[in-house]
Image (cartoon, grey):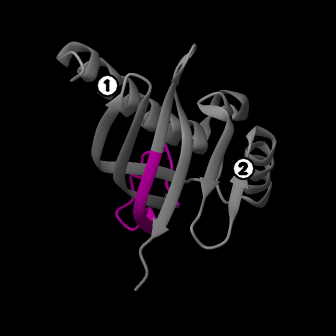
Amino acid sequence: MPLDPIVRLTAESDIRNLIARLGHLADDGDPDEYLGLWTEDGVWDRGNGEAHRGREALRERVLAYRASGLQGPGTGTKHLNTTLWVSIDSDDRAHAQSYFVFLTGASNAIALELDAPRPQIALSGRYDDEFVRTGAGWRIRSRTITVDVS
């Protein structure tokens, strides 16, 4: 039986907001709020053998990336997400695909000099995400990252 159109649209909107919030929190937010968007058994898979399963492994990855300066507050990184397609599979399951661009050297300061450094594209690729609806709303169950290579 097809989902009610309003239920489907609401779920799609919630998931689009979740994906956007995830990017904002990765760049400038609180790690606990970021981790709260994942299920307890969530999986973050870089697709190159680097996979992190479960909330504690996800926490270790976030803290390690921040400690090394790869992302997080003060690093000048921005996760840009685009061409987002969401599919609601059932009342409590969904998946999405989107493209991403990962910038380094971005700043919230306004560069008044024409020769000031500009953000650079460090990576681009695709996210393949799976979601489940929990008592707290939609949460990401898995993210598989495919990085474009030249």
Residue 13 marker: 1
SS class of the residue under badge 2?
strand
**Residue 94 location, x and y as percent?**
39, 35
Q: Does the magenta stretch include residue 142?
A: no
Q: Where 119 sits versus 27, above or below?
A: below
Which residue lies under the disc numbered 2?
Answer: 53
Are discs 1 and 2 less than 8 Å apart at CB? no
Q: What residue appears at the point 55 percent right and 54 percent down from the top-left corner?
A: 77
Q: Where 33 sits versus 87, above or below?
A: above
Looking at this view, is 28 or 2 the one in front? 2
Q: What residue type is labelled 1?
A: Ser
Highlighted magenta segment, given as a residue range = 105-129
**Residue 28 location, x and y as percent?**
60, 39
**Residue 48 location, x and y as percent?**
61, 73
Q: In which quadrant is the C terminus drawn?
A: bottom left
Is tag 1's residue or tag 2's residue first in the polypeptide sequence?
Answer: 1
Label 2 crowd bin: few (<14), some (14–19), many (20+), radius 10 Å? some
